Amino acid sequence: MIILHCLTQQEWETVKKDKYYGKELLDSSNFIHCASIEDFWRVAPYFKEIKEPLLLLCIDTDKVEAEIKWEGDGNYGIEYPHIYGELNLNAIVDVLPFLRDEHGDFLLSEELRSYQVEK
């Protein structure tokens, strides 16, 4: 299954040559926030005010070395994947742009749609 993690292009440029990602996130949140492709639209509004370019890491859950827990958000009964440990970068199968419409709202790209179908 493919899950998504959003970060700035600048953050990605800083870590993309490393073997692992997320130490700073683990220090502050204890896990790396992710979402399924189907539910990403629910968290996308949190990124609306960020003006710098954003990217979506497409993560193959079968390749993640750390534990992934699907946990509720406390609202609506939706569970999101949280990675409890650093993310090994070889679990990332694609890095896609976070596409937005003219209002800054998230757009589901054809590439993401293709991962949705492959489930």
Image (cartoon, helix red, strand yellow):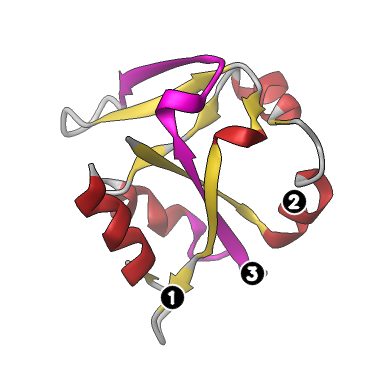
Quadrant where the image shows the C terminus: top left
Q: Residue furthest bottom?
A: 102
Numbered range of the magenta stretch: 47-72
User: In which quarter of the view is residue 55 placed?
Assistant: bottom right
User: Disc 3 or 2, which lies upstream in sequence?
Assistant: 2
Which label was assigned to residue 11?
Answer: 2
- Picture coordinates of residue 42, whole percent (x, y): 29, 50
Q: What residue would you read off at disc 3?
A: 53
User: In which quarter of the view is residue 18 placed?
Assistant: top right
Q: Which of 90 and 75 lies nearest the eye of the viewer?
A: 90
Q: Which SS class for mark 2? A: helix
Quadrant where the image shows the N terminus: top left
Question: Could you tell me how far apart the alpha carbons at marks 1 and 2 are, in whole angstroms?
Answer: 19 Å
User: Disc 3 marks which amino acid?
Assistant: Pro
- Picture coordinates of residue 82, whole percent (x, y): 45, 24
User: Disc 1 or 3, which lies upstream in sequence?
Assistant: 3
Task: Please tell me whether residue 31 is drawn above or below residue 95 in the rendered image.
Answer: above
Q: Which SS class for mark 3? A: loop
Number of other residues with Cα within 10 Å of mark 3, as a class: few under 14, some 14 to 19, many 20 or more: few
Question: Could you tell me how far apart the alpha carbons at marks 3 and 2 are, in whole angstroms?
Answer: 10 Å
Number of other residues with Cα within 10 Å of mark 1, as a class: few under 14, some 14 to 19, many 20 or more: some
Q: What residue would you read off at disc 1?
A: 100
Q: Is residue 97 left or right of residue 87?
A: left
- Residues at badges 1 and 3 in contact (C-beta under 8 Å)? no
